[in-house]
Amino acid sequence: MLLLHIGAFHLDVDSKRQTPWHTLTPQTRVLCVLLLLLAIVLTPHGNWLTWAFYGLGILTILLVSQVTVPVLLKRLVVESAFIGVVLIGTLFREGGEVLWQWGWFKITTTGLTVLGSVTLKAFLALVLLNILTLTTSVPALLQALAALRMPPLLVSILASMYRYIAVLVEEFNSMRRAAISRNLMSSNRWQRLVVGNMIGALFIRTYERGERVHLAMLSRGYQGLPPVREMPKGRRRDILALSLTAIFALLGQTVYLVR
């Protein structure tokens, strides 16, 4: 998700606000989001009432955290364009009544149910993750993941990716400006050729630069673990938030279990 917003790299637009959501520690915010994500993903297909219930909970978090809605919508549009391509494949699932058929392709009632269910799950998950990244800085998120005992190697990879994506974007822009100054972007055909060559050159430069950076880090005492600062400890409000989130997630599951 982070890679989709390299053009607007300031991810934590609303991290300085003073709201009840912001008073929670980053670890608590991550755990609350994970609990809701698990509950949403584990809900079987076709349980629309359960997702409506979770949608109300997410709307409450959205209002409490005072997220900037236009920024949230803009990011959702960008991410949905990528995820939509993947979701189309679920439309042609076998089973149920055939509604439309053309050769091997056919749309069934089961396919429509699966498509709607997966789309809702993806949408709710994207809203949750965007609220988390909008209200929590990336360094705080990485520190929270390290404090939650996520494998240090994964945290290091995420930290390096965040640190150097801006460098790669600047490198790509420099190459693009150089191509424009040499009049190599005058037609669509030339643009495709030049951009393809730039991506290949950028890959090689990335590999070489990664090697140099890693050697420089090793010479400065890097041991494969990111520096972990002391995180604020959970207080009574964090325990309360986690408890309410867990109860809310379980209530959502009971909506379809008791029907």
Image (spheres, rainbow, N blue to C red):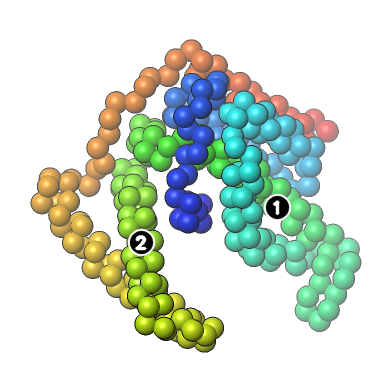
Of callouts 2 and 1, the N-terminal one: 1
Q: Is residue 71 above or below residue 234?
A: below
Picture coordinates of residue 100 (x, y %)? 87, 71
**Closer to the camera in the image, 94 or 147:** 147
Q: Secondary structure at mark 2?
A: helix
Q: Amino acid at mark 1?
A: Thr
Kindly identify which residue carries mark 2.
Answer: 170
Number of marks drawn = 2
Whether label 2 touches label 1, CB < 8 Å = no
Picture coordinates of residue 113 (x, y %)? 79, 54
At 47% from the left and 39% from the top, the residue drawn is 12
- Per the model, the C-alpha gap separating discs 2 and 1 is 34 Å
**Residue 86 seen by the camera:** yes
At 23% from the left and 68% from the top, the residue drawn is 208
Relative to residue 82, is residue 88 drawn left or right?
right
Relative to residue 162, is residue 82 drawn left or right?
right
**Closer to the camera in the image, 196 or 237:** 196
Q: Secondary structure at mark 1?
A: helix
Kindly identify which residue carries mark 1.
Answer: 119
Residue 85, by quadrant, is bottom right
Residue 183, by quadrant, is bottom left
Q: Amino acid at mark 2?
A: Glu
At 68% from the left and 33% from the top, the residue drawn is 59
Q: Which one is in front in this view, the residue at disc 2 or the one at disc 1?
A: 2
